[in-house]
Image (tube, rainbow, N blue to C red):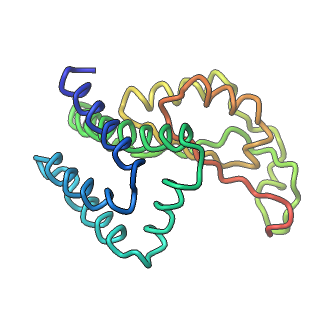
Amino acid sequence: MTLKENLEVLAVKTAIGYLNKDPEKNIPNLLDWFDLFDRNGTLEQPRKVVRAALENKESNWYQLTMSLCKDIDPGVRDRLFENFIINGCLLGYQRQLENKEKYHCNVPWAILLDPTSACNLHCTGCWAAEYGNHMNLTYEEMDDIVNQGVELGTYVYLFTGGEPLVRKKDIIRLCEDHPDCLWNFQSIQRGLM
């Protein structure tokens, strides 16, 4: 990371600590600070959307944000915020823009990753049951995809499938090997269908 990026990361980590002290009081202050931080207006539209959602205390987004600030383990919460805000948005987005220009292509903010077509569930109408368990990415292939994505500035990964947790050991290993990434699982549980 450059000196500028290190200073930006330090500023965001400081802001996260500030948020943790009193989220309801400090969210408006952090939104104002972030407006000043985005000097080039690169994130102007997303900032407006976030501000509108978080200024409405009745909105689901405000309630979710308060729950994230108050109801989950502080270490998990801080890692989530750091990976989402610092890696996924701040550093990642700038790297994505640079690589978009360099390679003349779009670089995704998030990558959908299907580790397997296998599924241990048999939900009516689901395509996974038709494909069986013959299409699997190896751990090395998944790791390579993530390494390439991070190099391009993509830190957010969405696991789909089949049932991604059929590959639980490999997925946990992948998450452990890439603690700077944000992971989301589209996993179906029996009884929710």
**Residue closest to the far left:** 39
**Depth order, front residue of 93/180:** 180
Q: Position of residue 167 (x, y in %)?
A: 77, 36
> Which residue is drawn at the image coordinates 49% and 37% (left, top)?
79
Quadrant of the frame with the C terminus = bottom right
Q: Position of residue 115 (x, y in %)?
A: 68, 38
Task: Examine the rendered structure and indicate whether residue 46 appears above or below residue 87.
Answer: below
Q: How many marks?
A: 0
**Depth order, front residue of 134/181:** 181
- In the image: residue 32, left or right of residue 13: left
> Which residue is drawn at the image coordinates 80% and 40% (left, top)?
166
Task: Examine the rendered structure and indicate whether residue 118 appears above or below residue 71.
Answer: above
Task: Examine the rendered structure and indicate whether residue 131 appears above or below residue 54.
Answer: above
- In the image: residue 78, left or right of residue 94: right
Q: Position of residue 162 (x, y in %)?
A: 75, 49
**Depth order, front residue of 138/187:** 187
Quadrant of the rendered image containing residue 83? top left
Quadrant of the frame with the N terminus = top left
Task: Examine the rendered structure and indicate whether residue 158 appears above or below residue 180.
Answer: below
**Residue closest to the far bottom:** 58
Q: Position of residue 106 (x, y in %)?
A: 32, 44
**Depth order, front residue of 82/120:** 82
> Which residue is drawn at the image coordinates 13% and 50% (left, top)?
36
> Which residue is drawn at the image coordinates 85% and 66% (left, top)?
191
